[in-house]
Amino acid sequence: EDGYDLWLRYRPLADSAQARYRPLATAIAAPQDDPSIRIAAAELHRGLSGLLRADVPASADAIAPGAILLGTSGDRRIAALGLPLSTLGREGYLIRSVRVDGKPATVIAANSGVGVLYGAFHLLRLVQTGDPIDRIDIRSVPKVELRLLNHWDNLDRSVERGYAGQSIWDWWKLPDITNPRYVDYARANASIGINGTVLNNVNAKADSLTAPYIAKAAKLADIFRPYGIRVYLSARWSAPIEIGGLKTADPLDPAVAAWWKAKADEIYAAIPDFGGFLVKANSEGQPGPQDYQRSHADGANMLAAAVKPHGGIVMWRAFVYAHENPDDRARQAYDEFKPLDGRFADNVIVQVKNGAIDFQPREPFHPLFGAMPKTPLMMEFQITKEYLGFATHLVYLGALFEETLASDTFAKGKGSTVARVIDGSLEGHARTGMAGVANIGVDRDWTGSQFDQANWYAFGRLAWDPEASARRIAADWAGMTFSTDPAFVAPVVDMMMRSREAVVDYMTPLGLHHLMATGHHYGPGPWVDDLERPDWNPVYYHRADAQGIGFDRTKTGSNAVAQYAPPVARQLGDIRTVPERDLLWFHHVRWDHRMASGRILWDELVTRYDRGVAEVAAMRARWATLAPYVDADRHADVMRFLAVQAREAQWWRDASIAYFATFARRPLPAGSPPPAHDLDYYKALRFPYAPGN
Ligand SMILES: CO[C@H]1[C@H](O)[C@@H](O)[C@H](O)O[C@@H]1C(=O)O
């Protein structure tokens, strides 16, 4: 009971449920010629046999009453059923109760083996969560084309912002020796529809493009292929110099273009379905086309030309901020990319983080969404919780992802949600994508804690359908992972849904952001002011002074708010209409400003910190009552994590209040205890979980 199985747990259901499902899952009938369908059949065999405590055999042709029939449009038996498969695309599927040769059966049909595999995982989920399958009629088609994990994994197996142990890619042993974990990784991803993985860190080493590493990546691609997962690589811009012996990496130099073309040919010879490149350029010290006075479009298009003959793509990141002293880092991606709209080749997609700063507990949606109608933009979420308490704090990110996706850009009037930018429907793009920075490592539980598995899971489900409900997804996950008992699922889902607001409250309430201590981003460091770049310092972001607190991004300040469509800009730019959750993101507000609650800002701020601490205490108390529904090991494991979180929520609250009180110079609201220590204590504190501190 260590969590290795993730949500693919096939322990026996309750007796009554076994009895209900058994007649509907007597055998699996699957053609043997398609590797993905063979995997689907094996997974159903494994899952159903475990869940129903029965042998559910898989064979090529037997159609017994209650059989599950798998197949593609090309199969004779599927064709005979006359199912509407033509609108499913390559990856969609149907699951239906039908009659085959007069016998009742369930069919899982698609246009490809991978579609069938997705359908098989869906059927298993229904059985795991206790949904009826007797009169089933499901049609599911992904709304987003590229559903990708981004591993920030280095070749030495360290993982940038990874909190679940070392990288699962054992580069030293590959390609000759592989780990069974790679197969389980592929199963887990296929079960939630993830269809691509970028193997190496965006802070890339050129070595990953050398022949030995291409062979290693090719081996992984071979393992992942039948699961519908393509391999991609992060490309280091200056690779032509570092491993190619060229003098320059200027994208307009023909020798550079020729080098990349030859490199692409070499990769595709080893990996015929290689997905393409992900690039971080001219950002945080990484090389890029601007080193040669060329634009991001010049750079992206040159690489795109190299992979184009092979059907590959380039994902070009918009996470950039300039080296010069910036007056507002939040403005910079928009300022650099918006003018390039329409200048990217058709196999380039620009990858934009959910917010304009950097994966904070809460950020307003990135102003580029809706602002580049001629360019497909893909979403980059961070599944690993760099700024949300690493793997030790329980925070369900489904709520964060959903909030961003549901945000209305108003780019084409009301209803122009970020989800509709991402799924291509708003601006008519066929090329669409969503990437999640993976939280996976070699820990037995994969993600560093039991509940962080839910964030990987939710990412995949929302990439398949950006309009899906985070709450429903949490319920599925909790049911599959722990227990389907409603007395368990309801409180756990409630706790998960509230957990995101809790972390916002105890770290950065009311629109505050980037107050984490330097470098590791774990504990509080709102006082930090001595870093080489001003926009790395927390004081740059909160701007507290004797009058008030917050970053003025309105007309009187950086005017970053003007990057949004006018209705959004008007709402956010006006202190009377901006939602309080974003107040201090956009406004510098007086300490005595009257809030909706009737309290003044200072009192409200303290109240939010208190609320965050109280919420974690409530999560702990609630989880303690759920012991009867969870195996003892995992229950105790989660308890230990919640104890850490409770301690650290208090630390965040106390340190932040001790610091901000030096500006506000007001008493704490009634009932709010003073911080346990004085400010100097918090400033001197070393961070228990941060390497090098
Ligand atoms: C990969 O580098 C990361 C860096 O570690 C991280 O602190 C910041 O969030 O963003 C960078 C990026 O997204 O490029």
Image: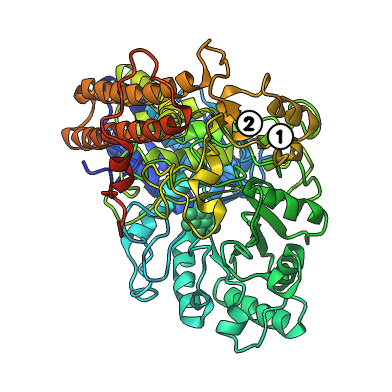
| Of callouts 1 and 2, the N-terminal one | 1
Foreground residue among 425 and 85: 425
Task: State the image coordinates of residue 163 (x, y, percent, origin top left).
Answer: 35, 51
Q: Circle 1 is placed at which residue position?
A: 554
Question: Which quarter of the figure has residue 607?
Answer: top left
Whether residue 130 is visible, yes or no, is no
Secondary structure at badge 1 equals loop
Task: State the image coordinates of residue 328 (x, y, percent, origin top left).
Answer: 65, 47
Task: State the image coordinates of residue 160 (x, y, percent, origin top left).
Answer: 42, 59
Q: Which image quarter is the N terminus in? A: top left
Furthest-top residue in this view: 598
Residue 303 shown left or right of residue 667 in the figure: right
Task: State the image coordinates of residue 229 (x, y, percent, origin top left).
Answer: 52, 56
Residue 183 disc label: none
Q: How many marks?
A: 2
Q: Circle 2 is placed at which residue position?
A: 587
Residue at 18% x, 37% y: name it. 633
Q: Disc 2 marks which amino acid?
A: His
Q: Which image quarter is the C terminus in? A: bottom left
Instruction: Report how far apart the C-alphas of labels 1 and 2 lie in the structure.
Output: 7 Å
Furthest-left residue in this view: 632
Residue at 76% x, 63% y: name it. 297
Foreground residue among 657 and 76: 657
